[in-house]
Image (spheres, rainbow, N blue to C red):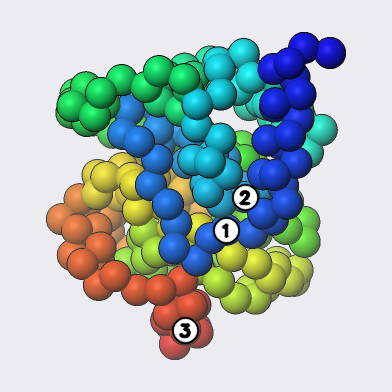
């Protein structure tokens, strides 16, 4: 067995020993595709073990990604390549200087909510929006999306912890915060989900789409995930 396979196997065991998300989520080094790592890797574990594993070579990160398949990781080849590029560069043996890592990326003229969903949400909620029974609640047909105009943005920004019932099924767990997304990205993905899978038919209140200014105001409230759950209960 290759040495890198042994490293990856050891890291993989450590990753899954974590089990749940950290209470205070860690921040990975800035760099292209960091958001994709956040969206895919926090499905099963916090980011502490990624940071502690910084410095392993690129082929060890590649082996690690392959080993995750036994735990259900399913990512298309283009996403895998982007994740591996980030891990091998910014958490590899020779990360770039901080100044280079923090160089601002170009901001797209228009944010694609469907692309944000694909990169950040599919691992749990699935491409069809139906989630995973007893693990991750569906977004398709989920009336929580229309409790009020702002509620879904609260969930995206701050996460939510508590038991919810959707479609007659109970889901008790914790969604991590996705505050690494920009205001425009949060607005775009909420608007996308509200219109996908015939969810627009649930919009009986005729709630208007969110915009970046709305999300910026919500972000400033800085709620905990349990406070978001309490907010949900007050809205229902």
- Whole-Å distance between the Cαs marked 2 and 1? 5 Å
The answer to whether 161 is drawn above or below residue 17 in the figure is below
Is 131 on the left-hand or right-hand side of 148? right
**Mark 2 / mark 1, whichever is N-terminal:** 1
- Tell me residue 58's x, y (percent): 55, 15
Q: How crowded is mark 2: few (under 14 residues within 10 Å), some or many (20 or more)?
A: some
Name the secondary structure under disc 1.
loop
- Tell me residue 49's x, y (percent): 57, 44
The quadrant of the rendering that contains the N terminus is top right
Q: Which residue is denoted by mark 2 in the rendering?
A: 45
Label 2–label 1 contact, CB within 8 A: yes
**Mark 1 / mark 3, whichever is N-terminal:** 1
Residue at 33% x, 45% y: name it.
181
The answer to whether 96 is drawn above or below residue 164 in the figure is above
Residue at 75% x, 41% y: name it.
13
Q: Which residue is denoted by mark 3 in the rendering?
A: 230
């Amino acid at each position: 067995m290759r040495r890198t396979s042994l490293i990856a196997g050891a890291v993989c065991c450590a990753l899954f020993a974590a089990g749940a998300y950290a209470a205070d989520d860690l921040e990975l080094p800035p760099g292209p595709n960091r958001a994709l790592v956040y969206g895919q890797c926090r499905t099963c574990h916090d980011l502490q073990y990624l940071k502690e594993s910084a410095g392993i070579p690129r082929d060890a990160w590649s082996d690690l990604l392959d080993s995750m398949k036994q735990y259900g990781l399913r990512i298309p080849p283009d996403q895998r390549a982007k994740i591996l590029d980030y891990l091998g560069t910014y958490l590899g043996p020779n990360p770039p200087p901080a100044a280079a890592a923090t160089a601002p990326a170009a901001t797209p003229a228009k944010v694609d909510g469907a692309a944000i969903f694909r990169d950040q949400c599919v691992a749990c909620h699935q491409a069809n929006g139906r989630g995973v029974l007893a693990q991750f609640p569906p977004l398709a047909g989920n009336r929580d999306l229309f409790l009020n105009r702002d509620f879904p943005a609260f969930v995206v920004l701050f996460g939510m912890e508590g038991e919810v019932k959707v479609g007659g099924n109970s889901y008790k767990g914790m969604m991590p915060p996705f505050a690494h997304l920009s205001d425009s990205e949060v607005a775009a993905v909420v608007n996308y989900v509200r219109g996908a899978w015939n969810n627009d038919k649930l919009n009986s209140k005729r709630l208007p789409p969110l915009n970046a200014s709305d999300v910026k105001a919500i972000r400033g409230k800085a709620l905990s995930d349990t406070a978001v759950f309490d907010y949900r209960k007050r809205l229902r």
